[in-house]
Amino acid sequence: MDSAPMESEKSQSSRHRMLTTVFLCLLSLIAQSLYSLLVPFFATEVEKKGLTLHEIGFVYAVYPFAMFIASPIFGLMVPTMGSKYMIWAGLTLEGGCSILFGLLNWITDKRTFLILAIILRFVQGLGAACYITAAYSVVASLFRQSIATTMGVIETFSSLGYAIGPPIGGLLFTIGGFILPFTIVGSIMVGVAPIMSYYIPVYKDDNLSTTKIMKQFIKIPYVYLICIAVCLGVMTLTFLEINYAIHIKKLNLSYLQIGMVFLIPACTYALLAVITGMAADRYGYRQFLIAGLVIMAISLQLLAPAPYWKIPLNMWLIVIGLIIYGIGTNFLFMPSFAELLHLAADRKIGDNLATYSVASGLFKAAQSFGLIIGPIIGEALISVPKLGFPWTSSILGCVLFIHAVLITCYILSKKYANRRQSKCCENDDEIKQALLHKKPSKESIEYTKDSVNDVFTLQVKEIASVMK
């Protein structure tokens, strides 16, 4: 009698999940395309206004800096404000600032342009941190048992958005100048905000203490190891984006060929994202995380190539290195967020919205910090005369490998400690059981009686001496 309503409820729930996934994929596509939209034309256009390369770099860097600061804060706010409202507010904020950013081209004064550009990019970063943190919480709440697989689907669209952003930006700039790319994509973002917030489910709980969960998270060393791994991975990614095109120009490649080269890791990442997510959900997250660090370390030795290999730079080495790098980033980024949630459940921190939102805030902050320090550390090392790109790439690869070893040592030490503790507990239980079931012998009873009599006799003698 009740089977029909139950089946209807299940189908409605699955349709709701599917619709939410579609909207989250669309959200990632638009967000990443907006982030990479300005790459083809922004630097050359603002140079005409007199901005230096350092000032242009600061305009780029302020976006991830805002995300780094705001992501943990928004993670604490998700249960109170609700994921639906935060997604709407974040999209509206970033989309609105993007439209205003397009209007900056009408400002002729260099100083005014720079100040307003920095402010608008910072607010854009706040908006992105707001809706991305909330979106990760929704993913964790809806797809707890298959979170890496779902993240793989979403990351596929994220990679697609990052790849199509520059050509769309270049095309719209050619048609309508500086204002058109930001106006169109910003308007789309503002327009879809209420639609997404309507269909995405409400996740809100005022009774959950996110501050307490954050304090529990930051006491665990493994949380730092995961976040540093994510940060290092993103750092190498931004390092390559900025410097690799200059390095491979030695092969006399055209701009089109260089663009195709950069599509290799993006396509590898997008094609393998879902498969990696499914495998990580089935076989465990930490194995993939460690393997990702090691694979990326190997690829960074190939891409230069490493000076101690004495191999000349060639096209085959570039292609193989970038494919391996794409596989490594897949293995590292797909299971990292899921591993944070698995750790929280394992340590009894919680398996609820507050836990998901705090974990998403930490994860996004780690990614953003990598975006900030990647160009800084890369440029600092490359500028050293005896290092250059080959040695810098090799050093960063070694850092990734060392961090993989650190994570492995930590996991093995925790396993050894847990095994030792469980053995001690087993031994204690065995001793207790043995003592409970052991029957006293006649000799021990007689010995106890004699001991009591001796003590009583001594006490009587002491009292008698006192009375005298």
Image (cartoon, helix red, strand yellow):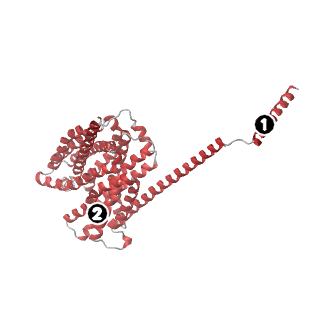
Q: Depth-wise, is mark 2 or mark 1 nearer the camera?
A: 1
What residue does disc 2 label?
244
Q: Nearer the viewer, residue 379 or 445?
A: 445
Q: Secondary structure at mark 1?
A: helix
Under mark 2, the amino acid is: Tyr
Return the residue found at the far left: 175
Quadrant (top left/top right/bottom left/bottom right) for the C terminus: top right
Total labels drawn: 2
Q: Nearer the viewer, residue 175 or 405?
A: 405
Under mark 1, the amino acid is: Lys
Res 436 visible: yes
State left or right for residue 128 relative to residue 386: left
When the figure is inspected, residue 168 is found, relative to residue 457, above or below; the finding is: below
- Say which mark, if any, is on residue 369: none
Distance from Cα at disc 2 to Cα at disc 1: 89 Å
When the figure is inspected, residue 265 is found, relative to residue 432, above or below; the finding is: below
Q: Secondary structure at mark 2?
A: helix
